[in-house]
Image (tube, rainbow, N blue to C red):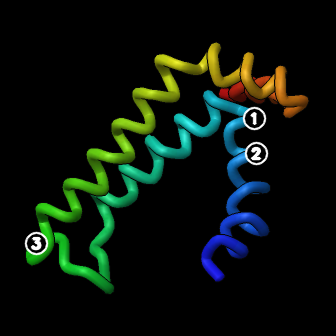
Amino acid sequence: MFSSLQEVVGRPINEYAFGDIDGLIATVDKVLDWDQRVDNGFTSKTSHQAEWQDIRKGLGTLREMLRTRADEIRATRKQNGLENRKPKPKLD
């Protein structure tokens, strides 16, 4: 069941998200910022601090991988016929 869900939902999300590496990095940054500021009403950050920090570390590792391998990811996507979207210009 999980494999089916991953294929139906996960693949389209990943295909879209990785089409704009800069946007994906910005999203991970926003997620980490939000997670730092907002209490978790489901799982205590203090009672489960090691697990919480482990998840945050994993997202940080993902962010660094995206930064260091952005060109490689874009090239692989192009080879596979997937779109690489250009980042939208930021308006001040």
Q: Circle 1 sits on which residue?
A: 19
Would you identify the image quadrant in which residue 91 lies? top right
Between the residue at mark 2 and the residue at mark 3, the CA separation in whole angstroms equals 35 Å
Q: Residue at point 65% right, 71% down?
A: 3
Q: Is residue 50 left or right of residue 52?
A: left
Q: Position of residue 46 (x, y in %)?
A: 10, 72
The local secondary structure at tag 1 comes to loop
Q: Is residue 45 left or right of residue 88?
A: left
Number of marks in the image? Answer: 3
The local secondary structure at tag 2 comes to helix
First in sequence: mark 1 vs mark 3: 1
Q: Circle 3 sits on which residue?
A: 46
The three-letter amino acid code for the residue at tag 1 is Gly
- Judged by depth in the image, the label closer to the viewer, 1 or 3, is 1
Pointers 1 and 2 in contact (CB under 8 A)? yes
- Judged by depth in the image, the label closer to the viewer, 2 or 3, is 2
Q: Is residue 1 left or right of residue 38?
A: right
Pointer 2 local density, CA inside 10 Å: few below 14, some 14–19, many at least 20: some
In front here: 48 or 1? 1
Q: Position of residue 78 (x, y in %)?
A: 83, 22
Give the vertical position of 65 relative to 53 (above or below): above
Q: Position of residue 76 (x, y in %)?
A: 73, 23
The three-letter amino acid code for the residue at tag 2 is Glu
Would you identify the image quadrant in which residue 19 lies? top right
Q: Position of residue 60 (x, y in %)?
A: 35, 39
Pointer 3 local density, CA inside 10 Å: few below 14, some 14–19, many at least 20: few
Image quarter (top left, top right, bottom left or bottom right) of the N terminus: bottom right
Pointers 2 and 3 in contact (CB under 8 A)? no
The three-letter amino acid code for the residue at tag 3 is Thr
Pointer 1 local density, CA inside 10 Å: few below 14, some 14–19, many at least 20: many
